[in-house]
Image (cartoon, coloured by chain):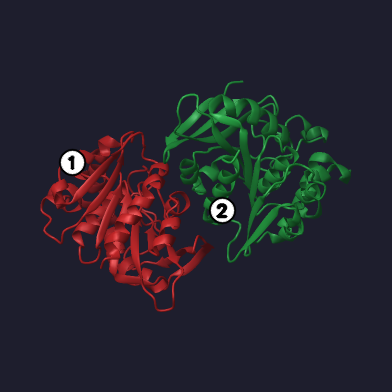
Chain colours: A red, B green
Amino acid sequence: MAATLVSSNRSFRGRQSVYKHASATTKCEMTFGVYIPDHQPEEKLPTLFYLSGLTCTHANFMEKSGFQQFASKHRIVVVHPDTSPRGVDIEGDSDSWDFGKGAGFYVNATVEKWAQNYRMYDYIVKELLEEVAPSVAPIDAARVGIFGHSMGGHGALTIGLKNSSKFQSISAFAPICNPITVPWGQKALSGYLGEDQSTWLDYDASELLKKYTGPKREILVDQGEADNFLGQLKPDTLKATENAGVTVRMQKEFDHSYYFIASFMEDHFEHHAKILKAI
Amino acid sequence: MAATLVSSNRSFRGRQSVYKHASATTKCEMTFGVYIPDHQPEEKLPTLFYLSGLTCTHANFMEKSGFQQFASKHRIVVVHPDTSPRGVDIEGDSDSWDFGKGAGFYVNATVEKWAQNYRMYDYIVKELLEEVAPSVAPIDAARVGIFGHSMGGHGALTIGLKNSSKFQSISAFAPICNPITVPWGQKALSGYLGEDQSTWLDYDASELLKKYTGPKREILVDQGEADNFLGQLKPDTLKATENAGVTVRMQKEFDHSYYFIASFMEDHFEHHAKILKAI
């Protein structure tokens, strides 16, 4: 169904807008943000999808990261969805901050209780990318990248690696690199996918990189050394795959906050712009 | 009393911190934020005070403006206080969003009910600038500027003009330019100062500029053309004083939000850096 404009603010040389729409994938109303640089009629622009972390909505990134400056400079559309369905109430979806609302983990749930709505993987890869976002923004489908933070970094890595024809560039801030081995990931993957751990592998960036055979990727990852969640994130596991094109930069003194993300936003835009504008 | 650290995050090449302290001026606990670029021991840095608008705390600016990037680049300390006392409850201080808590208007109240605590003018100019901020940050007292947004733009203009030996550079985003003539200003000034309007003139930027005889100032003001509050802000009144060194730039399509502030933050830092670093 058509997206409805919720808000729109002039920001640098473009506009930061928020839309809502009825989602066929999650079967409830979804909200997302989009930054659109000034452009000519009919002009299509390279586009980045940004996936947020646990507890975030679409809003944290647009209010706290300062990304608009660089999206404006490089003339890149940025689409930033919510982190879970919110227009439906399921028993247990609000009991903890790392499961249910605000914690969709970018998977398609198969456990019956969640399977009707918690389909953030298909929501991003199919509905938002292919239908809804192009209905409101001048997206050049041949030049699309993906990035994200923490749980959203996990989403960006897994979605990007599994859909290399749709996403040409990938990066992440402090991603959950190996969810099958850590409490956050185990709770989410068992909850949404059930106890058969073989089904979890398909949503684990480190596992996907081991067997990745797609086009060569240069993946940029920044990770703060003072991040309180290093035990959940496991950057070392990802670093071990650097031969697969992943560069993990450990950043001294930085934590897990948006102050960390904002500090390296410019580098991530330069990473994506270089790749997407060469296409 | 000594300031206590509330939080500290690495941000660009410096740290964004928050402190609280018992204020002798407002007779309650006050919270403020400060960004400190990396520096050598004993090194003193140019410093900016940022005053926020109605309803804001110290936090909006540090979370939404993206200023840290430019404070880091220019190596400028930035101190950003709250907008009113909050550690005391006075009947009527929370009845409206444009008076009382979150709306101190940077005056020294003389109406008895408010006069003990609502002394944000002295709090900024004396206690924070001269005692508390220098106790936590490497402030070069000879190179200090002031800027702010909306009510805080009014605060920056009036405080800056009245204390030209303490503040060497001034700018504002969408300031309240002529508060004695508009509803926000009339409500605040009558509430804090009483009905004798002659006492209000000392807190009105346009009136102060008419009789300003201090050192030459180049004051930068940005104002969005799509700002919903133009009737309260009255940029035209300030524009009429441009011979006094005020440049008012009207910015097409921009509104009153932090998206507007963020879009022109770089220009304001360049304005202040040019002046402060030439001293």
Same-chain status of marks 2 and 1: no
Q: Position of residue B9 (x, y in %)?
A: 43, 35
**On the picture, is B215 further left or further right than B252?**
right
Q: Position of residue A124 (x, y in %)?
A: 31, 62
Q: Residue A123, relative to residue B146: is it above or below? A: below
Element under disc 1 = helix
- Residue at label 1? A237
**On the picture, is B254 further left or further right than A62?**
right
Dot 1 amino acid type: Thr
> Closest to the observer: A158 or A203?
A158
> Closest to the observer: A190 or B130?
B130
Q: Residue A8, relative to residue B147: is it above or below? A: below
Residue at 40% across, 49% down: A56
Residue B103 in view (yes/no):
yes
Dot 2 amino acid type: Ile
Quarter of the rendering containing residue B243: bottom right
| Residue density around tag 2, few if under 14, some if 14–19, many if 20 or more, within 10 Å | many
Q: Position of residue A173 (x, y in %)?
A: 32, 47
As measured in the structure, the alpha-carbon distance from the residue carrying label 2 to the one carrying label 1 is: 41 Å
> Closest to the observer: A26 or B129?
B129
- Residue at label 2? B261
Element under disc 2 = helix
**On the picture, is B264 further left or further right than B95?**
left
> Which corner quadrant holds the C terminus of chain B?
top right
